[in-house]
Amino acid sequence: MPIAPTWNCSNVALDLSRPRVMGVLNVTPDSFSDGGTHNAPEAAIATAAQMLADGADLIDVGGESTRPGFTPVQPNEEFRRLELVVRWLVHEGTLVSIDTRHPEVAQSCIDLGAQVINDVTGFSDPRMVKVAATSDCGCVVMHSGPVSGTATKSSAVMASAEKDDLSALMNGASAGNHAWEAGGDKPLLPDSSHVMSLLEDYLLDRARDLEARGVSASRICLDPGVGFGKSPEDNIVILRATQDLASLGYPLMCAVSRKRFVGTVSGVASAPARDDATIGISLAAVARGARVLRVHNVPGMTQALDGFWAASEPWTSRVTLLLSPAAEKDAQQAIEAVGAMPLTRVRASRIVDGKLQVEAETGLNRIPFQHALEAAIEGIATQAGSPLIERHGV
């Protein structure tokens, strides 16, 4: 099955002909990588603004850490942490994702205008399914739990009002188990067919349950849950099978940023220092079909992705520019300057309400295009509006 072309998130149809970058914004005091850095709303908003300027396509805001050994947060406290930040992001027109496992928090944020629910318990709570079914939000369905050895499909964490299975999992099984080594030959990696069968069956069951309740498939994104109750060996198997997961027909997320597993394979102990390795793993996932990259380091990821994509894929976008020439005679010079930009060609131009409107096709993504444009029209024209990407793909 081909890679899903779009991900529908409320009023936004996110074009996936090119991978998208999701910035991680933890408004918590105890997240494993940046706990406390964005705890105050003002700091979180400043960080979000910088992420958007650096090229983030959407922001994933979380008010409860789910790191190994995390302390569960009551829904009212979680929403208190989120509310001001979500309000600001929505006001700025940002595509906002809410990283929560609590239906009441998800509903409150959807009411504020958030467009995505990112649920680490995979929409296993019927109340969370109801939130999705009664809105038009995007849904990130994640798998938490073991996938090898004695694991079964029912080993996955399922939301429960009686007990906190996720907390128990992350407290006691953050590195996964090695029960698959019981065989006489002690294989280096668990059996791929077993791991992927459990993972795919779970994700498809959860997605189909959402669809049965009226959530269209185009709203569902899958996340295999690297690092959540899985050993480094499990994670390697899953990442090498990214193409299989992408072929299930739903948008696929790669969410490995700064995780312990990344430190294992890169030899980097400090979580904030794992960004380079995160980028390497994420690009490998992109090459196999992942289209949403959840990362802490937005500028590093966007720069790497821009370079990788331009060199590896025949991708272009249609861009509409509204320019103000310095003088009437400068209009033609401005058109020629845009046409001379790298990987860019002017397809049409006209004067609209006294402004020069230029239609162009480019192989540059938003930020490199913007920088090239600023250099090209300096002294000739000013930009009267942000570039509008109308259509992706060749």
Image (cartoon, grey):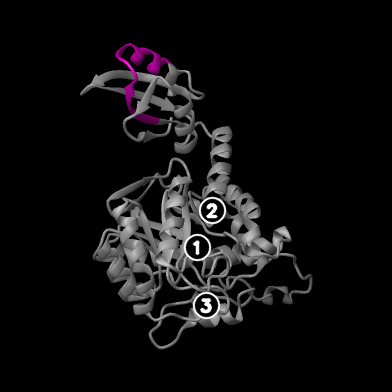
The residue at which mark 3 appears reads as 155
Q: In this view, does 153 lie to the left or right of 317?
A: right
- Nearer to us in this view, 176 or 81: 81
Image vertical order of residue 160 relative to residue 208, above or below: below
- Nearer to us in this view, 141 or 271: 271
Q: How crowded is mark 1: few (under 14 residues within 10 Å), some or many (20 or more)?
A: some
Image vertical order of residue 60 relative to residue 300, above or below: below
Residue at 53%, 68% (x, y): give it.
198
- The Cα atoms of the two marked residues, 3 and 2, are separated by 21 Å
Residue 228 appears at what percent x and percent y? 55, 70
- The Cα atoms of the two marked residues, 1 and 3, are separated by 13 Å
Residue 56 appears at what percent x and percent y? 45, 49
The residue at which mark 2 appears reads as 244
Check if residue 323 falls in the magenta segment. Answer: yes
Element on which disc 1 rests: helix
Element on which disc 3 rests: helix
Outermost residue, left side: 353
Q: Quadrant of residue 117?
A: bottom left
Q: Residues within 10 Å of mark 2 (few under 14, many from 20)?
A: some
The residue at which mark 1 appears reads as 200
Residue 146 numbered mark, or none? none
Which mark sits nearer the N-terminus, 1 or 3?
3
Residue 341 visible in the displayed image: yes
Residue 271 appears at what percent x and percent y? 63, 64
Element on which disc 2 rests: helix
Q: Residues within 10 Å of mark 3 (few under 14, many from 20)?
A: some
Q: What residue type is labelled 1?
A: Glu
Q: Do the residues labelled 1 and 2 touch (CB within 8 Å)?
A: yes
Q: What residue type is labelled 2?
A: Asp
**Magenta highlight range:** 318-336
Which mark sits nearer the N-terminus, 1 or 2?
1
- Nearer to us in this view, 361 or 142: 361
